[in-house]
């Protein structure tokens, strides 16, 4: 069961042609958790690689000053207006624990929370839904810059790390179940991209579900990341009952799908499209026991384009491929019939500072390789077949000449090269195929490797089915 947060009502999309309840959204990455690859200008003077290191180098006063400027300017209400206009129905907002629970010895600065509240208020005004994602936890869950600190995976080493994270989750749950937010927050994600051992992970998920779970009466679902295992691994998952024969109600699964990392970056276009289709069919299987599953992060970066140095606006072939790759994933990651595990997707991200083409949704809109209104199938190029995959046999070529994309004041000097995105925020990843769904292994800077579906980048926008 997946609730919208408004007395169980079903959320309809902008177009009657779209199945009721499908939410298509984006991540607001690089905002409340800063990441060097998404917002390089924030880090360039200190030559640092994480928010922890940045704040250490600047000192608390200067760090607060610089980050306040970033938080107040990187995402504005105009961005959410544009997100709504694009037919997207949801936003996913990454947040670090230090926005709520900060100890004196930690170099981080807090001040992000009012901007989170503001974003939720804007979403309420505009008719968008929101997922809040605990992107960084004490000690780090993966050792990657996205968690706030690069290095070891220390979260499971001390029970206080779990206790502090649960405190943050309780804070978020208590705050965003208040009536003033209008049921905008439909999901709270317990932890983004963990890669530590299964036993402590399951223990934390159970504790987290007990914190967030009581809020399902207010419309909030508990969301867990799949820890880079395929969604079928979580068949009949119930954090309260290890012997359950069906998934727990109000618990949703987040999986991240990327095609930019070795060895998946060696795949040709046909192989990529085939695997996208296969994965989609896996999460569209009726009565599979897979929990309601959303693709919380995906992008257009693939090995086919990731190392390109051509200007996107001048590269007709690249834009043609981007259009096909986007529509294939839109079709695969959104449900097309009742009873499926699939509940939708979030794209990573709405924008980056320099609007890297494969990772910037708004650039895709401007350059025409993302449909102008993703909630209106009449704006699609490729028909969706009964199996939930696109018809690749449609002849299509992107326009030959288009205006250069300027973005906003943060993107005037944007390079359209996608080469910077081949490693994304985590710097390294590897992948293999398993079964009918694409799977991967993803390596942290600490050397830990876990079975993975893909790496995650930035703030995602997504499509999520809202089932009453």
Image (spheres, grey):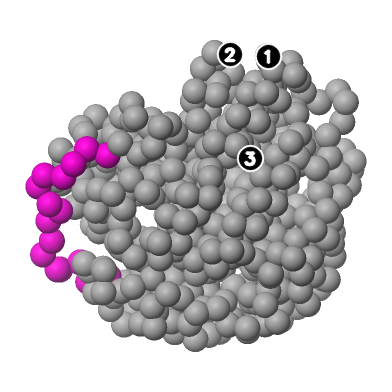
Taking 392 as reference, is 12 above or below it?
A: below
List the residue tagged with mark 3. 32
Mark 2 and mark 1 in contact (Cβ < 8 Å)?
A: yes
Label ID, residue 57: 1
Q: Does the segment drawn in magenta span residue 452?
A: no
First of labels 3, 2 by sequence position: 3
Label ID, residue 46: 2
Taking 302 as reference, is 71 above or below it?
A: above
Compared across the picture, whether 138 is left or right of 74 comes to right
Q: Residues within 10 Å of mark 2 (few under 14, many from 20)?
A: some
Taking 320 as reference, is 249 above or below it?
A: below
Q: Residues within 10 Å of mark 1 (few under 14, many from 20)?
A: some
Taking 211 as reference, is 266 above or below it?
A: above
Percent position of residue 227, x then y: 63, 52
Of residues 276 and 212, the one nearer the viewer is 212
Q: Give SS at disc 1.
A: helix
Label ID, residue 114: none
First of labels 1, 2 by sequence position: 2
Percent position of residue 397, x then y: 12, 56
Residue at 20% from the left image edge and 45% from the top image edge: 318
Of residues 179 and 49, the one nearer the viewer is 179
Asked whether residue 86 is in view, the answer is: yes
Compared across the picture, whether 278 is left or right of 390 comes to right
Which segment did they paint magenta? 390-405
Percent position of residue 16, x then y: 39, 83
Residue at 84% from the left image edge and 56% from the top image edge: 170
Residue 278 appears in which quarter of the rendering? bottom left
Residue 254 appears in which quarter of the rendering? bottom right
């Amino acid at each position: 069961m997946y609730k919208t947060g408004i007395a169980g009502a079903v959320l309809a999309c902008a177009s009657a042609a779209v199945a009721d309840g499908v939410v298509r959204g984006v991540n607001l990455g690089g905002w409340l958790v800063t990441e060097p690859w998404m917002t390089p200008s924030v880090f360039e003077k200190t030559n640092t690689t994480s928010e922890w290191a940045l704040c250490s180098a600047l000192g608390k006063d200067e760090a607060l000053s610089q980050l306040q400027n970033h938080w107040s300017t990187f995402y504005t209400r105009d961005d959410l207006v544009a997100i709504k206009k694009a037919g997207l129905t949801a936003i996913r907002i990454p947040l670090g624990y230090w926005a709520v629970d900060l100890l004196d010895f930690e170099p981080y600065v807090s001040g992000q929370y009012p901007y989170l509240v503001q974003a939720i208020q804007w979403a309420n005004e505009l008719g968008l839904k929101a997922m809040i994602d605990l992107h960084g936890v004490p000690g780090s869950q993966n050792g990657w810059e996205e968690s706030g600190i690069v290095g070891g995976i220390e979260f499971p080493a001390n029970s206080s790390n779990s206790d502090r994270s649960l405190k943050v989750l309780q804070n978020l749950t208590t705050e965003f179940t208040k009536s003033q937010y209008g049921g905008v927050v439909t999901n709270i994600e317990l932890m983004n991209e963990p890669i530590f051992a299964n036993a402590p992970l399951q223990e934390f998920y159970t504790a987290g579900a007990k914190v967030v779970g009581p809020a399902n009466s207010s419309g909030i679902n508990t969301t867990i990341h799949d820890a880079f295992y395929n969604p079928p691994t979580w068949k009949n998952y119930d954090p309260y009952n290890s012997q359950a024969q069906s998934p727990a109600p109000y618990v949703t699964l987040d999986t991240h799908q990327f095609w930019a990392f070795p060895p998946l970056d060696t795949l040709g276009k046909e192989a990529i499209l085939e695997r996208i289709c296969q994965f989609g069919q896996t999460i569209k299987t009726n009565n599979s026991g897979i929990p309601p599953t959303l693709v919380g992060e995906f992008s257009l970066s693939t090995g086919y384009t990731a190392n390109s140095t051509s200007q996107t606006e001048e590269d007709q072939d690249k834009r043609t491929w981007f259009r096909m790759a986007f529509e294939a994933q839109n079709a695969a990651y959104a449900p097309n019939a009742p009873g499926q595990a699939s509940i939708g997707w979030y794209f990573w991200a709405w924008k980056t500072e320099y609007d890297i083409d494969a990772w910037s949704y708004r650039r895709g809109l401007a350059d025409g390789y993302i449909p102008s209104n993703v909630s209106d199938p009449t704006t699609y190029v490729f028909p969706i077949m009964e199996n939930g995959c696109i018809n690749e046999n449609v002849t299509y070529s992107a326009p030959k000449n288009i205006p250069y994309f300027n973005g906003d004041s943060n993107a005037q000097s944007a390079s359209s090269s996608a080469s910077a995105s081949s490693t994304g925020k985590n710097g390294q990843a590897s992948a293999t195929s398993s079964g009918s769904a694409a799977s991967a292994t993803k390596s942290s800077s600490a050397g830990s490797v876990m079975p993975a579906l893909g790496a995650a980048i930035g703030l995602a926008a997504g499509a999520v089915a809202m089932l009453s």
